[in-house]
Amino acid sequence: MRCADNNSPVLTPGTGIPQPLTPAPSRRTGRRVTVAVYASDPILRVGVVHQLRQRPEIELVPDADADAAQVSLVTVDSVDDETAALLYRLRHNPDTRTGLVVGTFESGDALQRAIECGVSAVLRRAEADQDRLLRLVLAIANGEGVLPGDLLAKLLDHMGSLQRSALDPRSVSLSTLTSREADMLRLVSEGLDTAEIARKTSYSERTVKNVLHEVITRLQLRNRTHAVGYALRNGLI
């Protein structure tokens, strides 16, 4: 699963990217695990914070210290572009490891995307009671990976499918561009700018920028022109 070249309680002003909420305690060798909570809306955030602040093992950090937290816990309905942008940013923060509490993964691609964006542990929101949240946070702080068995099977099936596709000489899967990524790169190759691509695809300009940035970063390319050339050379568009 690849994190686009790009990223939840209250959205970060002007970006639409979720921002951490304040909050509280874990006991790891006598020390509490510091946790920053992010959520896609205030209600989700308050629910997670309420569960964790009751535990003496956890210390919920204020927003100003979120980047220094040992664990970043992101709670969302699904992994969309804004969530991916946040996860991508957190992946490059050496001080934190990231866990994801998610409503649903709409596809194997979405699950792969989260893992590629640095998520080390996943919990379904429907199962996120206080004890499971605590176990998730402590596992993340201890450097462990957590993935429900059925999601692991789904991920393995998806990766196997990608591998089989890559071995097929007629396949165009390479570093697997999603259909949306391929469509946007195709429009870039036709000379359209961000605003024109947004109108053509009915996405916001911010989403267009995030998607293209994700591709460029993921494939370690220099810019949009380089990305278009790469995609054309490898038969992706």
Image (tube, rainbow, N blue to C red):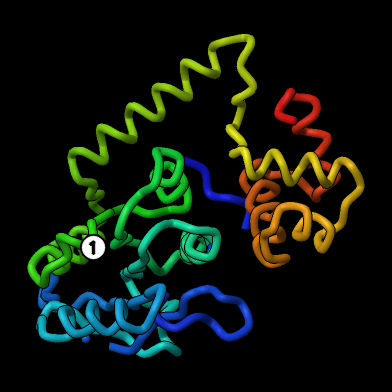
The answer to which quarter of the image holds residue 141 is bottom left
The spot of residue 16 in percent (x, y) is: 56, 76
Determine the residue located farthest toward the top in the rendered image.
169
Which corner quadrant holds the C terminus? top right
The spot of residue 110 in percent (x, y) is: 43, 46
Q: Residue beneath label 1, please?
A: 125
Determine the residue located farthest toward the right in the rendered image.
191
Residue at x 11%, y 85% (from the top left corner): 54
- How many marks are shown on the rendered structure? 1
Disc 1 crowd, CA 10 A, few/some/many (<14, 14-19, 20+): some
Q: Amino acid at mark 1?
A: Arg
Relative placement, left or right, of 197 versus 98 is right
Most foreground residue, 76 or 97? 76
The spot of residue 21 in percent (x, y) is: 36, 85
Q: Is the residue 228 above or below the residue 78 in the image?
A: above
Q: Is the residue 154 above or below the residue 217 in the image?
A: above
Residue at x 45%, y 64% (from the top left corner): 94
Most foreground residue, 90 or 128? 128
Residue at x 42%, y 42% (from the top left corner): 112
The spot of residue 199 in percent (x, y) is: 78, 59
Residue at x 36%, y 84% (from the top left corner): 42
Which SS class for mark 1? helix
